[in-house]
Amino acid sequence: MMMLKLRGLCIGILLLQAISGFCQEQVAPLRFNPLLRPRLNSSSTSKPLNKATSLGLPFFEDFTDYDLYPNQSRWTDSEVYINNTMCNNPISRGVATFDALNKYGRPYDTVDRYDLLYADSLTSQPFDLSNYQPKDSIYISFFYQPQGNGFSPEASDSFQLYFHRKEGGWAQVWAVPGADVQDFQQVLIPVIDTSYLYDGFQFRFVNKATINTNDDVWNLDYIRMGANRNINDTAIRDLAFTTNPSPYLNDYTSMPYRQFLANAAGERGGAQSDTIWNHYGTNGTVNYGFTSVETTTGTPLGSASTTSTIPAYSKLGFSFPSTTTTVSLPNPESRMVYQNNYFLQSGNPAEPKSNDSIQCNTVFDNYLAYDDGTAEKSYFLNLAQALPGKIAIEYHLNIPDTLRGVAIYFGQQVPTATNKEFSITVYSKLAGISGSNTEKVLYNQDLLYPMFTDEINNFTIYKLDTPLVLPAGVFYLGTTQPASSGSDSLYIGLDVNRVGGNHLYFNVNTLWQSSLISGALMIRPLLGGPVAGTGVNDVLPAPTSWSLSPNPVFDNLKISSNVYANAYLITDLQGRSLHQSIINNNQIPVSDLAPGIYFLRIRQHDIWSTPQKFIKL
């Protein structure tokens, strides 16, 4: 029987596990990729191919474009996710990820959790192979990896390659069943059948997946097709960066610039490091280095370069000392960006150039972050019966500052988690942690609800009712889920690419424990000047009663409330906002909604209510 994969991190202190009989920390697949939908609707730098022109050979794709979708000059569809975070030990920077989320970043199927169907596809633009014959020995090669930083595909899942025939229709030429994570594997497939040697040939990669749970991940890289090849033609004449360079900051990924300047030597990483891979069978000489600039003021921060020889089929790790130049703040709240541009030059004109440069930014803004802004999984707690669940992340300040709000990246759930309550809690001490015998709460804000947004870097912003002045030193920020409220298993984004300690603690049995997960939980304190909440998300639930009727409904809902209600919000099962408007005569029109299940919230005296479910017929 196929099961939703909540595995790999079912952890906790063994004694407490034995007592409680359940797993305390868990991770789950992403059910939504909020990066994709706004990016798909915006203008793209890639230009579609003129349909009167077919591609020619040789063909090479390394997925190093700075775009989340495949380049439309080479591909006809937009279903895979181009990134550098979902893979392990990549061949070079940039991969195409196949999962169970469509081009809008949402599940293909929101009803049947275990429906096994074809999910993502990646289809090439047409090629003109009409002037080739079987003796020209055309081969296509590529590297694939199951799981990566996601969840592994089941044995019943598969990754497949199809060729389009001159006579019409698609022929499957290769397939592999699901497996646990492994290094990238190279595959070579001949394109010598006369059915493929015509003007209009295309190839297509497809993954077969459980299209509701998004636990079936494959990564694809280094696609190469050319003539005069053979099955042993596995070497690639390319020197390439393999990953993103190490972060500029030592622990945080982002922080306010005033906090950085207060202890720049302590916050700054010692070196900027990366790896160059020589994929060819001869030694390669390469010049490599970086330049750094502060983008707001245009101030040069530093540069470095050197030349090395990399043996055949080998990797070269390199490090340059971090730039120590700083920039004067126009004001204490200024946003600053350090932009590091890395380059390599091999001197071989035949080598692909697309993977020879990387731009890496360090943002200094009004928040503290350990994450890189992208989630690969979701994290949640299983609550013990009749006990609350608490999460706390340790942060440090170099100078006193004011906590104004909290940004949280929520993982989507089906059914929606919009009715799960939680509180924001700030501590100066946790009992049993760092030598403290007591727990000291500095601030608590009850009760809030998760929402999901495509704005503000995909984080929901919760504004504190009362700003909290914090001294220099350590503080802890997190969430509290009330006991016996149905609010357990609240998904929060997990950045599994985090290097170093996760600074995370949890409490489900009245005792604080150090988290054993790898990665950064995506909760960010907002510091300094005033912040604005994300729409309806920074308010308390209304202590009022209300009802809706009829339910199910065809065209209009009628609202009955014991206090004045002036606005409404309708969301779908994924928590996506569909309609928000003013309530007229206690009526809410729903005739434009497709049949299905939805949630409704109303605003009573500027306070948003708890959601109620209704069925649209």
Image: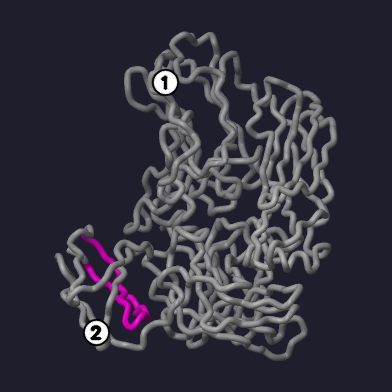
Type of residue at label 1?
Phe
Q: Is residue 139 above or below residue 419?
A: above
Type of residue at label 2?
Ser
Q: Looking at the image, which residue is at 72% across and 54% down?
A: 247
Percent x, y for residue 74?
Answer: 48, 29
Instruction: Check if residue 596 falls in the magenta segment.
Output: yes
Q: Quadrant of residue 347?
A: top right
Q: Is residue 519 visible?
A: no
Percent x, y for residue 503?
Answer: 68, 70
Q: Is residue 395 above or below residue 40?
A: below
Task: Tell me the magenta residue range.
Answer: 595-615
Q: Nearer the viewer, mark 2 or mark 1?
A: 2
Residue on which the image places disc 2: 561
Instruction: Check if residue 267 falls in the magenta segment.
Output: no
On the rendered structure, is 288 left or right of 26? right
Q: Residue furthest bottom?
A: 438
- Which element carries disc 1, helix, strand or loop? strand
Percent x, y for residue 598?
Answer: 28, 67
Q: Tell me which numbered mark, 2 or 1, is placed earlier along the sequence.
A: 1
Count numbered badges in the picture. 2
On the rendered structure, is 308 left or right of 74? right
What number is the disc on residue 201? 1
- Which element carries disc 2, helix, strand or loop? strand
Quadrant where the image shows the C terminus: bottom left
**Mark 1 residue crowding within 10 angstroms, few (<14) / some (14–19) / many (20+):** many
